[in-house]
Amino acid sequence: MVAAGISLLAAGSDGGGSIRIPASFSGLIGLKPTRGRVPTGPGEWRGWQGASINFALTRTMADTEALLRGLATTQLAAPFNASPLHLEDVNDPRPLKIAYTTQSPVGTPVSATAVKAVALVVDALRAAGHTVVEAQPDVDGTALMKAYYLMNGGETAAMFQAYTEQTGRAVTAEDVEPVTWAIYQAGLHTTAADYSRSLDVWDQAAEAYSHFHDSYDLLLTPTTAKTAPRIDAELQSPAIVDKMKHAAELAPDEQKQLVWDLFEPSLAYSPFTQQANLTGAPAISLPTAISPDGLPLGIQFVAAKGREDQLLRLGYWFEQHNLLQMYPLSESDDISQAE
């Protein structure tokens, strides 16, 4: 709807990339604000322990900025609050120090299209006077994803247990998709100690990012490691699907391994987005590339907590220099061949 110009924006929530990933696949702008930046509650305040946040996909930076200004708030009742929003530096001309990487944090392959998309952006940023060097935060991406999945299981179990208490009826495998059932079963065996320790892993990653941003204003990566799969693509094998359906029969360690295995194919498409969710940092996907087969692919900038101004600043710069590659609404709007 947004890419076709029917709507100015589409609301979304981003708990691991669910704004930025479709933005990359659709040729749109997708901002994930700093944890605590936009309203939460009432009733449910933590949203995956702060990993999930609401915002939107847009076609223009002006719409992105307007929505951010309109939604930014401080809620005294909320467990997470961001520093005050300051957008006075959106037009700051001073050069930035930007780190970049095209290495998947979980060791999965990254397509040549995604690598080239980042390389072209690196060249453009250097030509504009920014300092751009290859570097990345010192974070164990695999351990962080395992901690993320553990939280997913615990939160799913809590949700379904609340449903059972309210309705007097337990959730069964026939009620939900196999992937949800498998996550639920793993969550039933997640101890409070395991859950608490998983959040420690998040916090250690947030500390690593904080130190990283002492040296670099922004981190540049591909948003997705490759372009979108076909809508009818089967990402899980029949053997994994069968295991998911019978997840309740597996031992707890087998259930945890199954959760990793079932997410592995989708993680291969989007290994770069989750770290911003788990550290609380703001991140934006910008549509700067079109693959040889005509599919869009975005690049991602991650800023320090509270520094959405730097993300907007670069987004406006790309937009003003005709470097955003969106599907044109009309012949006069076509910027795909812009110099």
Image (cartoon, grey):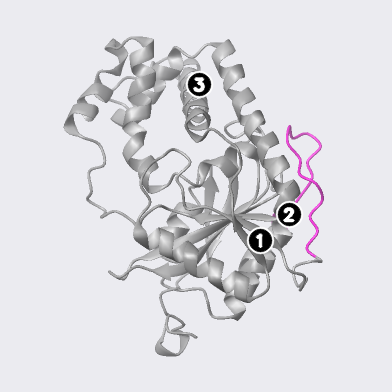
Q: Secondary structure at mark 2?
A: loop
Picture coordinates of residue 43, whole percent (x, y):
65, 31
Would residue 246 be found to the left or right of residue 311 on screen? left
Q: Quadrant of residue 195?
A: top right
The picture quadrant where one finds residue 181 is top left
Q: Are marks 3 and 1 in contact (CB under 8 Å)?
A: no
Q: Is residue 51 visible from the viewing direction of this image?
A: no
Q: Is residue 38 above or below residue 254?
A: below
Residues rendered magenta in the picture: 70-87
Q: CA distance from mark 3 to mark 2?
A: 31 Å
Q: Amino acid at mark 2?
A: Arg
Dominant secondary-structure state across the stretch colored magenta: loop
Any mark on residue 154, and which? 3
Instruction: Give the spatial CA distance, label 2 vs label 1.
Output: 7 Å
- Residue topped by disc 2: 307
Q: Residues within 10 Å of mark 1 (few under 14, many from 20)?
A: many
At horizontal 47% and vertical 27% (from top left) the residue drawn is 146
Check if mark 2's residue and mark 1's residue have beta carbons within 8 Å. yes
Amino acid type at circle 3 is Gly
Locate residue 109, reporting x and y percent: 35, 47
